[in-house]
Image (cartoon, rainbow, N blue to C red):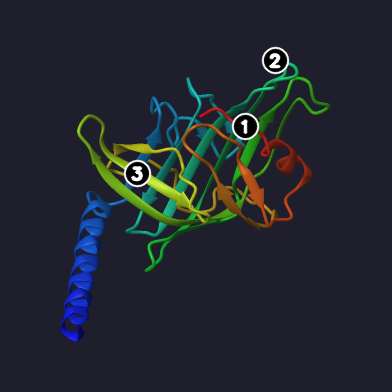
Amino acid sequence: MLLTSLAFLVYASASALAQQIVYDTAHNVTPITGTWSSGSMNVVTGAQFVYANNQSFTYPKTTGISFTFNEAVGWFEVLRYRMNGNGTNPNCPTTVLNWSHGYLNVEQNGSLVLVPVGDGFQRIEDPCAARSDFTEAYNLTELYESWQIFPDPVDGPKLHMFASDGSPVVPMRLLSATPDMLPTQTLHNTTQSTTVLKRSVTNVAPPIRWWKVAASTTIGAMLGSVFLL
C-alpha cells in the first residue's frame, strides 16, 4: 500500500510538471511585446486615432480594443472604442473612446499591472444626455491576473487576457510585433489623480462591471452597461 501511494504521488507530480510545461509553451508562443487588436483590427494604438497634445480622437471604422506592450522599456498603451446601445430609446446610443498609456509591470506570478502616467483621457457622446459630447480624464490602473498567447492556424498568435476575477478580455490578434505607440512619456500636463480599480470584460459583449472603486458619477453610470465590441 505504501509503495502504491508513493508511486501515485510520483505520477501525480510528473503529470503536474508536464501540464505546467505544456502551459508555459502555449503561454510563450510569441512575446507579448507588440500591438494587438480585436475583431476587424480597425482600432489601433499610436498616432492614427489619438492626438494626445489636444486630447482628441479620430474615430475608427468599427468598435474594438487595442493594447500595445513594450517589455524592453516597461510601457503599455491602450485604446478602446465602444458603443452602448439604449434598449429604451434606440436613438440614444452612447459612444466612448478612451486612451491611456504608462508603466507595464509583468509580474512573476503571470499577472499584468498597467499603471498610467496620468495624461489619459476619454470622449463620451450621448445625444440624449444633458452633456451630449465631452472629454474627461481617464487614468485607471488595471490588473489582469494572467495572460496567454495561443497559436491560431488562421489568425496567427492570439492574446487572451484575464481580469482579476478570471473573466476573459475579448481575444486580440497580433497586428505588429513592433510596438505602435505614442512617445513613452507624459504627453501633456495634468493634475488628475489615478483611480485604481479592477476591470472585468468578456468576449461576447456582456456587461462591463466595475467594483471596489470610488469612481466618478459619469464613469460609473456610463460603464455599467453593455458595450458592443
Q: Quadrant of the N terminus?
A: bottom left
Instruction: Identify the residue shown where x is 46% and y is 45%.
Output: 168
How far across and how far down the image is residue 25, in percent? 21, 56
Q: Residue at x 49, y 32 (%)?
A: 204
What residue does disc 1 label? 226
Neighbours of disc 3 within 10 Å: few (<14), some (14-19), many (20+) = many
* Element under disc 2: loop
What amino acid does circle 3 point to? Leu
Residue closer to the observer: 182 or 112:
112
The spot of residue 135 in percent (x, y) is: 69, 35
Q: For marks 3 and 1, give the one nearer the viewer.
A: 1
Secondary structure under badge 3? strand
User: Looking at the rendered structure, which numbered label has been put on residue 159?
Assistant: 3
Of callouts 3 and 1, which one flags the residue occurring earlier in the amino acid sequence?
A: 3
Residue 150 vs residue 10, the one in the foreground: 10
Amino acid type at circle 2 is Pro
User: Residue farthest to the bottom?
Assistant: 2
**Residue 157 figure quarter:** top left
Numbered mark located on residue 20 in the image: none
- Badge 1 amino acid: Val
**Residue at image mark 2:** 90
Q: Residue 73 lies in what quarter of the image? A: bottom left
Residue 2 shown left or right of residue 47 in the figure: left
SS class, disc 1? loop
Classify 129 as above or below 156: above
The answer to whether residue 115 is above or below residue 14 is: above
Spot occupied by residue 191 in the image (x, y as percentages of width and height): 70, 55
Residue 177: give x, y in percent of width and height. Answer: 27, 43
Along the viewing direction, whichever of 66 and 161 lies nearer the viewer: 161
Dot 1, how many residues are within 10 Å of its Cα: few (below 14), some (14-19), or many (20+)?
Answer: some
